[in-house]
Amino acid sequence: MRVKGSIVYPFVAFGNESLPLSQTYLIKNATVWTNESDGILQDTDVLVRDGKISQVGQNLSPSSTSVIDGTGKHLTSGIIDEHSHVALRGVNESSHAATAEVRMYDAVDSEDIDIYRQLAGGVTAAQLLHGSANPIGGQSALIKFRWGASPEGMKIEGADGYIKFALGENVKHGNRPRSHNIRYPQTRMGVEQIFVDAFTRAREYENSWNAYNSFSSKSKARTPQPRRDIQLEALLEILNKKRFISCHSYVQSEINMLMKVADRFDFRVNTFTHILEGYKVADKMFEHGAGGSTFSDWWAYKWEVKEAIPYNPALMHMVGVVTAINSDDGEMARRLNQEAAKSVKYAGMSEEDAWKMVTLNPAKLLHLDDRMGSIKPGKDADLVLWNDNPLSIYAKPEKTMIDGVIYYDIQKDKEMRIAIQKERARIIAKMQTSSGNGGNKAKPNGHRDLHCEDFTISNDYSQYSNSNN
Amino acid sequence: MPRPADPQSKPIILTNGIIHVGNGQVINNGAVGFDNGKITFVGQVDNITIDNSAYQTISVSGRHIYPGLILPASRLGLEEVGALRPTRDYGEVGEMNPNVRALISYNTDSELIETLRYNGILTAQATPESGTFSGTSSIMALDGWNWEDAVYKADDGVHLRWPPRFLKGSFFNPERKENKNYDETVTAIDQFLRDAKSYNETGNPNVNNLKLEAMRGLFEGSQSLFIHVNGAKEILESLQLAKETGVKDMVVVGASDAYYVKDYLKDNNIPVLIGDIHRMPFRPEEDVDMPYKLPYLLHKEGILVGLAYQRGLQNSRNLPFYAGTTVAYGMSKEDALSTVTLNTAIILGIEATIGSLEVGKDASIVVSEGDLLDMRSSKVTQAYILGKAIELDGKQQLLYQRFKEKYQK
């Protein structure tokens, strides 16, 4: 029972009085989905030490470690969401068509209850993306859901830099009122020119600095230094293969277009996200080397998703494209295991391949597969223990671990629910006695569930259904 | 697009399947016979009590046989592409429109319909959605050449959108705000219900009022009042007002806070259609699985629960998986099935003819290779609407085949 007035981390419901710590754990006798060539191993033990997976094998000895009984349960690596907007205080800098200078790291909200809800769904890491209001959006935040940590503490250390691009109806304001018909671009033709112009300017910017830097110190003293431009610097990172694009996209023409722009400027589009018509140009994507991170079965909510089919992930996978299933929705994210299973249902994909679409493949798309996405000694101990086959709708996470720290435990969650009820009753009683006695009053904070398209539209559910992503 | 099916021409018996009746009962090694669109036999294969010599026998060995699923309170057929206004036909302008009828907007050629059938949904309640009294719904069989052909039960209920006491804030100002028009709107609803009641009592008035005319069934018991409402206080206030003004049958739709007023719902036998269980809890301190377990919490109390889906229409094809979700959070599998079959039929007032696999009912039947409620195993192989064998594949399957072939070359 919580002591009155004690601090919890974070300072919201389901916060902890002290931060959970990394421990040595031995998970015994579980069905282990390795995502490696070993496939799915029965009755297998996994040893976790110093935040890493230390050993995978049978009959490992439990010397001085906490033993977790995995009998009848499934152990997997944590789910990674390639496309998320949870834990953010804002999602779209929509003033200009190109806003490569803005950073989602500056908007991370480490106290968002949705972080805890992600953990309860077995999600351990995500790319928090800028929205899709403009062709060139902002820089991504790659985080692990270390509940209780600061925004800085949630960052994935040493992760590559990513940036959101977007195509189609959102960036050309196709579904907005007439008052929005004035911002360039309004067509897919204009969208291409935004990119060509931006990359041309970035290259020229680099040239101007190269020229300046080649001057003698005498000439430098006589020449004004080029003006520093952090937007063009971010774009230059893309050209110099130091920052990677995740591009919101739907129809085949625009997917093809961005790959042609990338070819022209000699870089590779890392990921097409949403990519609902990826199946129509999967061969071109494969040849270019682009990955696809898609929805399992969304379609019909706007014109550009009219030919979206639930076979899209399977077709891209069949051609050899690295394929992931993403959420773009804080609620769906906590059921990404089921979204992956839909490829088993619709296209008869193997269960192992389907599972990789929410673990190993997004890790590959985020260049994190050397340390995340599979159960292999040396990789981060980001693990989920499920009560059933994780592709089944009947499966629930019982424990979710990040870097060897258990951040969600179904038993502890039960206890917290009781404590929260008591705390709630205490606060209400306090409010009742203080009202009218000059007690302090505070307005409740609203909560935003963010999606790609959000910035001025209302969050009301009835609108949401029409304006999804 | 699948061609509407022809009427059942010869009797059929499905054999060796696992029958999920819809009322909680399971029959292993079962057989379901149907003739002229009606179910003639349900039972074990080795105990067939009808003369099935004229029947076409279809072995569905090891597969599961279910009643067709029912999707209530939906825009199906009334919306094609959510973002495009010309394709939206579910919301008439104005507040009091009980006389607008979903039936005549219903588009049998909607491309969404085939994607629902593919997952075992064979019946839907097409429902208007706007204003206060939104209009009158109709129950549609998901096969037919036109709305007259497809209608299962015309004008089954009137839909009332009860106002919320608090409004969600805007994006830049997300604090909840008091709905200052609440009392005014409730007064208008009260007045309208009382006017409708008086009108009904006058029998044949000299001057017809189409709006009040459309409310008659509510007082005579031939139609239900579907109250779309989510907040706990609002649920109580709306039900009390409807009861007070003489409405016979009420259904709560949406119902996200229903658990907080479970005693009233139970004591007054009010059934509930839950609007969306795949959502976040509305309060940060609520149990993280509150929406998932809500159907079970109500069912456990003895409240009749059906599942609806009121977010993006495209996701309503996942209705079986909403039922599946409730199983992970307390429901038994067969009770979960009832929330998308028999319970819904009872709530819509059509249980005498549909909603379960029982002799005499219409042959609305789904066969799946595996568990229909789990996407890991659901694979519908056959479906029958009024005994008609319907085509399951649609445009999405055609596109799949087309591109699979392209890449296999």
Image: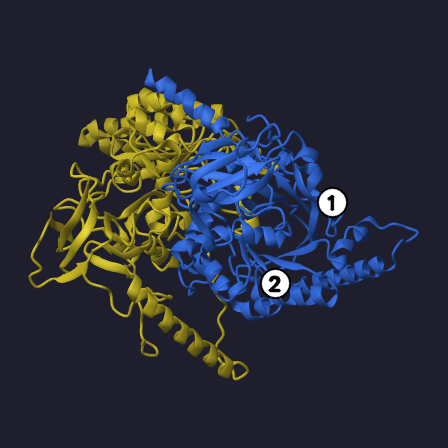
Question: Picture quarter containing residue B239?
Answer: bottom right
Name the quarter where the N terminus of chain A is drawn. bottom left
Q: Amino acid at mark 2?
A: Ile
Q: Is residue A3 above or below residue A165?
A: below
- Tell me, for residue B100, which label it has, or none: 1
- Tell me, for residue A68, which label it has, or none: none
| Chain for disc number 2 | B
Residue at image location 66% in from the left, 48% down from the top: B130
Colour approach in the figure: by chain
Q: Is residue B297 above or below residue A206?
A: below
Image location of residue A339, percent across then percent down: 38, 42
Question: Which colour denotes chain B?
Answer: blue
Q: Which type of secondary structure does the marked residue at label 2 adopt?
A: loop
Image location of residue A204, percent across then percent down: 32, 26
- The residue carrying mark 2 is B270
Classify mark 2: residues with Cα within 10 Å, few (<14), some (14-19) or many (20+). Answer: some
| Residue A299 shows in the view | no
